[in-house]
Amino acid sequence: MTREEILGKLRGIMGRTSQAKVDWSRVNEQSSIASLGIDSLAMLDLMYDLQQEFGIEFEPQDVVNVSTVGDLAAFIEGRMGA
């Protein structure tokens, strides 16, 4: 799966998780996850959805340092390649 495919899936999953009004087509790798209306509780839902969508497993502490969409995409890429 390419980075762009991962980003496309992330936009869709985050769009379902977020309560904020966001133009998801404008979300890029530099976009802050917090600015997209994903708080700590929504992040738990997002993590579950990511595990299901990408067929990966991880613990909440694994994503503590993830702050941008690009960070999250890189994390997923790393898990998929492991």
Image: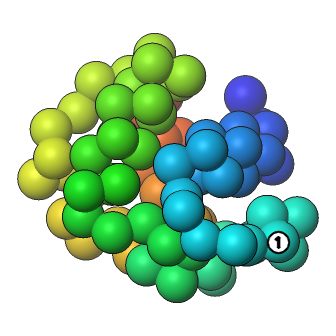
SS class, disc 1: loop
Q: In this view, does 59 lie above or below 4?
A: above
- Give x and y (percent) for residue 24: 79, 64
Drawn side of residue 77 relative to residue 67, left or right: right
Drawn side of residue 15 relative to residue 76, left or right: right
- Give x and y (percent) for residue 45: 35, 41
Q: In which quarter of the view is residue 48 placed?
A: top left
- Specify whether residue 8 is in view: yes
* Along the viewing direction, whichever of 49 and 81 lies nearer the viewer: 49
Q: In this view, does 56 lie above or below 12?
A: above
Residue, x 25% and y 71% (percent of image)? Answer: 65
| Disc 1: which residue | 23
Residue, x 47% and y 57% (percent of image)? Answer: 72
Residue, x 25% and y 56% (percent of image)? Answer: 41
* Along the viewing direction, whichever of 37 and 55 lies nearer the viewer: 37
* Along the viewing direction, whichever of 52 and 30 lies nearer the viewer: 52
- Specify whether residue 10 is in view: no
- Give x and y (percent) for residue 66: 35, 67
Drawn side of residue 76 relative to residue 42, left or right: right
Amino acid found under the numbered disc labelled 1? Asp
Q: How crowded is mark 1: few (under 14 residues within 10 Å), some or many (20 or more)?
A: few
* Along the viewing direction, whichever of 18 and 74 lies nearer the viewer: 18
Q: Quadrant of the C terminus?
A: top left
- Give x and y (percent) for residue 34: 43, 78
- Kindly give the residue lying farthest to the right in the view shown: 25
